[in-house]
Image (cartoon, rainbow, N blue to C red):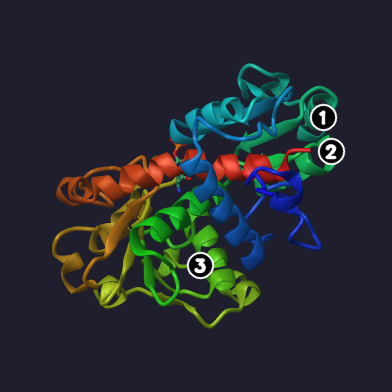
């Protein structure tokens, strides 16, 4: 008998500790990461023709206190494609924006909707929401992590290079932001080599690296050395949302721009990733972004497929 990729027994029972939420990559493991990527591959292949709709009859909410193009659109489309309906709640429009605590917001929404997707600043807010709301909760980006993006990135690496095993991945830019931290956790669990190349003051702090405690992630301030032989070169904005105006920080990143020069000593067949939005002539040149646009916009599309895998896995 054929088992649908969306069947509940298949999608979330291969672990003693099934996924209830997606709050971070940190809380996952190799088994869960691989299961999500495999399901994303299935869902991408069966888009428009899914044998089951696991969100049928459900309403999901999105609470965003930061801007978004990709995350918002991919979740709105993804929930609908899995049979559910979705409401977007800008924090300015709900009482959260006037100071109502997240734990009260969670206890109200938890009695009305079937799941919630949150983009905000403080990681503790998504943790609190998941605890108080008692409904599946997804981190759609906090200052600490961007787990949905990393799932899409991994799917893109798999599609473009076949595997991440044995590949040298480099994250160049702000080594201590949500993207770099999520990539570090992914490298720990999946075992690929990851080099973080960043100005000294933007490297992940030692207490974080001690917590990760893995030999396959290294830190350097030397972008040229870092990129030598790299298969995957990944960058992100120099100033994340909430850091606008930090000109002194931005001024540190000149040598970390992804440009034609720095890519000279990469591995043959290397790919360039950018989670977007991209700031041309800052973290990446127009020339390199357009040269790798096929990969970068495939990466953006993969947000949809990866997040549908998350939704299908954690939906109750
Ligand atoms: N990469 C990403 O999360 O894009 P948005 O901010 O547009 O959602
Ligand atoms: N590090 C970036 C990611 C944007 C998708 C930010 O937080 O703004």
- Residue placed furthest toward the top: 93
Q: Which mark is residue 275?
A: none
Which quadrant holds the C terminus?
A: top right
Q: Which residue is mark 2?
A: 134
Tell me, yes or no, whether the two marked residues, 3 and 2, touch with CB atoms within 8 Å: no
Q: Quadrant of ligand 1?
A: top left
Q: Is 173 drawn above or below residue 189 in the view shown?
A: above
Q: Secondary structure at mark 1?
A: loop
Residue 204, numbered label: 3
Which is more N-terminal, label 1 or label 2? 1
What x and y, as percent, mark residue 285?
19, 50
Q: Is residue 145 visible?
A: no
Sort mark 3 into few (<14), some (14-19) or many (20+) by Cα contacts within 10 Å. Answer: some
List x then y, in percent, for residue 197: 36, 69
The residue under label 1 is 110
Ligand 1 closer than 8 Å to label 1 CB: no
């Amino acid at each position: 008998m054929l088992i649908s990729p969306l069947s509940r027994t298949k999608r979330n029972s291969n672990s003693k500790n099934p996924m209830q939420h997606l709050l971070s990559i940190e809380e996952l493991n190799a088994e869960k990461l691989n299961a999500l990527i495999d399901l994303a591959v299935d869902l991408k292949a069966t888009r428009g023709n899914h044998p089951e709709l696991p969100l049928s009859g459900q309403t999901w909410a999105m609470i965003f206190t930061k801007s978004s193009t990709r995350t918002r659109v991919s979740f709105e489309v993804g929930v609908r494609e899995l049979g559910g309906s979705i409401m977007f709640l800008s924090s300015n429009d709900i009482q959260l924006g006037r100071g109502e605590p997240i734990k009260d917001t969670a206890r109200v929404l938890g009695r009305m909707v079937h799941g919630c997707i949150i983009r905000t600043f403080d990681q503790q807010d998504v943790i609190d929401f998941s605890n108080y709301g008692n409904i599946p909760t997804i981190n759609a980006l906090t200052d600490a992590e961007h787990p949905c993006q990393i799932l899409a990135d991994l799917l893109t690496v798999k599609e473009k290079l076949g595997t991440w095993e044995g590949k040298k991945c480099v994250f160049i830019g702000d080594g201590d932001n949500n993207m770099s931290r999520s990539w570090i956790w992914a490298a720990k669990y999946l075992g690929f080599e990851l080099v973080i190349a960043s100005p000294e003051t933007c490297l992940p702090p030692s207490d974080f690296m001690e917590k990760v405690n893995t030999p396959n992630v290294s830190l350097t301030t030397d972008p040229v050395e870092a990129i030598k032989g790299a298969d995957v070169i990944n960058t992100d904005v120099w100033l994340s949302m909430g850091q606008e105006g930090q000109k002194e920080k931005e001024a540190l990143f000149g040598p970390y721009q992804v440009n034609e020069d720095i890519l000279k000593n990469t591995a043959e067949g290397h790919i360039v990733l950018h989670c977007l939005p991209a700031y041309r002539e800052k973290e990446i040149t127009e020339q390199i972004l357009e040269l790798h646009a096929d990969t970068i916009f495939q990466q953006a599309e993969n947000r949809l497929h990866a997040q549908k895998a998350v939704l299908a896995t954690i939906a109750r």
